[in-house]
């Protein structure tokens, strides 16, 4: 039997496993929106960590980050280090308190938490929900595109086939079990991701002759590939590195990850989930970088004649037997759909609970919302096949800059008016757009940092002016 056969058998077997686990999770469900959206706030920390790992790393790791390392070399490691530091700070400073305050406020969605009240705060919830659907929907579409690119490189399928397969798998188990299905399948997918990355990075390193030989060969190709400090940074290394720390801290604006902290069974378990997730994520990211730089040596023509973002599947075909290639494809596809399912559920929650709240407590209504959002994301993915790295990183930026500063204000229980809250969200997104598209400075400092600083400055200025106005009124 051909390698192609075993690749297909292994890959399809894992897809079936995901569906079985997701559908089985529905046997534990309660027919309430709280259970569908937050698994009744009773997720154990092991599952929280694995789910956050799979959801956070996504196609950016297997496609985008591997391709980035292929192009820039060892300096890609700063992305991993900076991101890990920022992510740790967010979990350490924000997520434990988020779990406590969200339960106290009985908030089931991120947008509801940002509004934290009905009536005059309704506009905050509405605007944040629109932001969530716009950018998280695009983000989810990018995940489906990442998976379809990989399947195209291995099986020769057109992009639409991979996109449709991913959307159908996600729809089946999300519709069945909501976030519990997402978290359970995420845990399985995280394990597959880790195993596949460890196998390929080890095999690739052996084929390069070890680290020392890999280093020498990279230097022979281009000395910049072994330069720890990226060349031609407009503002120097420190702002560049701080930008990636800001990117990691931007997790506070990602509804599909924030909701994991809201669903954990106790705020006391946040620290364990954080540490486990950080450890495993760092190992995965380092493996991805090894794969990227090894591919630069083993597949040197990919930069000119192919797509560097497909370095991982191409290297798998070059080095691994059929059933392990199938495992790699399952790992890659796991990374994409484990993120897409979480994002689709968050968009569904924003649509059915926050934008059209008339049926907010209807279990049937939110399941219909899940299918509706899946169809929208599928349509976006079929239309747009742009760079996965660019799509994902900018969607992450817009969400971080738009929602992150306001979420921090709410977690700290600081006062904020409707006008200031909306100005914070819009100014953060606008700054990210200007920084990336208008000024073209994202290569110097990733746009999350200026975007979040913009929203924070709007809050500080607005709050100060309100305080001055209150003092003037009291004097009168």
Image (tube, grey):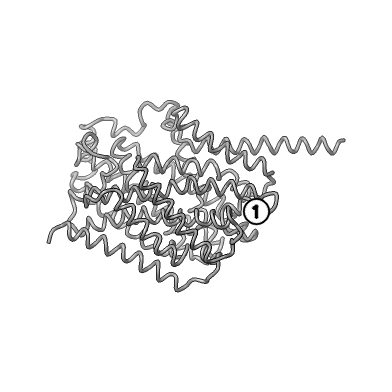
Is 328 situated left or right of 244 in this image? left
Is 178 situated left or right of 282 in this image? right
Is 424 situated left or right of 229 in this image? right
Residue 308 pos. (x, y %)? 27, 40
Query: Is label 1 in a helix, a strand or a loop?
Result: loop
Residue 426 pos. (x, y %)? 57, 38
Which residue is more in the foreground, 332 or 198? 332
Q: Is residue 264 visible?
A: no
Q: Residue furthest left?
A: 1
Q: Residue furthest right?
A: 476
Q: Is residue 146 visible?
A: yes
The residue under the point 65% across, 58% down is 105
Residue 16 pos. (x, y %)? 31, 65
Which residue is more in the foreground, 473 or 236? 473
Residue 178 pos. (x, y %)? 47, 64
Q: Residue furthest bottom?
A: 27
The residue under the point 52% across, 53% down is 258
Q: Is residue 197 above or below residue 174?
A: above
**Crowd band around label 1 with a 10 angstrom C-alpha radius: few (<14), some (14–19), many (20+):** some
Which residue is more in the foreground, 324 or 430? 430
Q: Is residue 142 above or below residue 46?
A: above
The residue under the point 44% across, 44% down is 83
Is 415 situated left or right of 366 in this image? right
Q: Which residue is mark 1?
A: 116
The residue under the point 55% across, 63% down is 266
Quadrant of the image containing the N terminus: bottom left
């Amino acid at each position: 039997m051909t390698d192609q056969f075993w690749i297909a058998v292994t890959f399809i077997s894992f897809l079936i496993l995901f569906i079985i686990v997701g559908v089985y999770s529905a046997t534990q469900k309660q027919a309430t929106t709280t259970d569908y959206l937050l698994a009744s706030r009773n997720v154990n920390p092991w599952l929280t960590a694995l789910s956050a790992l799979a959801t956070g790393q996504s196609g950016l790791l297997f496609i985008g980050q591997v391709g980035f390392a292929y192009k820039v070399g060892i300096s890609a490691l700063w992305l991993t280090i900076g991101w890990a530091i920022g992510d740790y700070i967010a979990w350490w400073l924000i997520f434990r308190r988020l779990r406590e305050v969200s339960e106290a406020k009985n908030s089931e969605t991120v947008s509801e938490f940002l509004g934290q009240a009905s009536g005059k705060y309704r506009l905050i919830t509405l605007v944040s929900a629109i932001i969530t659907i716009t950018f998280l929907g695009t983000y989810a579409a990018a995940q489906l595109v990442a998976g379809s690119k990989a399947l195209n490189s291995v099986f020769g399928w057109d992009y639409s086939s991979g996109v449709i397969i991913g959307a159908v798998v996600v729809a089946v188990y999300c519709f069945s079990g909501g976030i519990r299905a997402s978290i359970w399948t995420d845990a399985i997918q995280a394990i597959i991701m880790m195993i596949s990355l460890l196998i390929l990075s080890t095999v690739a390193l052996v084929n390069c002759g070890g680290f020392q030989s890999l280093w020498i060969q990279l230097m022979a190709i281009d000395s910049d590939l072994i330069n720890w400090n990226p060349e031609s940074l407009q503002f120097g290394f420190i702002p560049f590195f701080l930008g990636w720390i800001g990117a990691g801290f931007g997790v506070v604006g990602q509804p599909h990850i924030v909701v994991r902290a809201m669903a954990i069974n106790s705020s006391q378990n946040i620290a364990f989930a954080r540490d486990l997730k950080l450890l495993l994520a760092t190992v995965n990211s380092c493996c991805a970088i090894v794969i990227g730089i090894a591919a630069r040596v083993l597949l040197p023509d990919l930069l000119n004649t192919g797509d560097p973002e497909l370095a991982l599947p191409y290297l798998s075909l070059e080095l691994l037997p059929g059933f392990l290639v199938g495992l790699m494809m399952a790992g890659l596809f796991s990374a994409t759909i484990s993120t897409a399912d979480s994002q689709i559920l968050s968009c569904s929650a924003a649509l059915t609970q926050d934008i059209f709240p008339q049926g907010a407590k209807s279990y049937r209504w939110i399941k219909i919302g899940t299918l509706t959002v899946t169809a929208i994301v599928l349509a976006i993915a079929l239309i747009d096949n742009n760079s996965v790295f660019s799509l994902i990183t900018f969607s992450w930026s817009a969400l971080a800059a738009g929602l992150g500063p306001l979420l921090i204000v709410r977690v700290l229980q600081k006062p904020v008016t409707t006008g200031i809250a909306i100005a914070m969200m819009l100014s953060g997104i606008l700054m990210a757009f200007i920084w990336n598209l208008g000024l073209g400075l994202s290569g110097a400092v990733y746009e999350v940092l200026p975007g979040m600083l913009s929203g924070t400055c709007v809050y500080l200025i607005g709050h100060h002016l309100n305080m001055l106005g209150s003092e003037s009124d009291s004097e009168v």
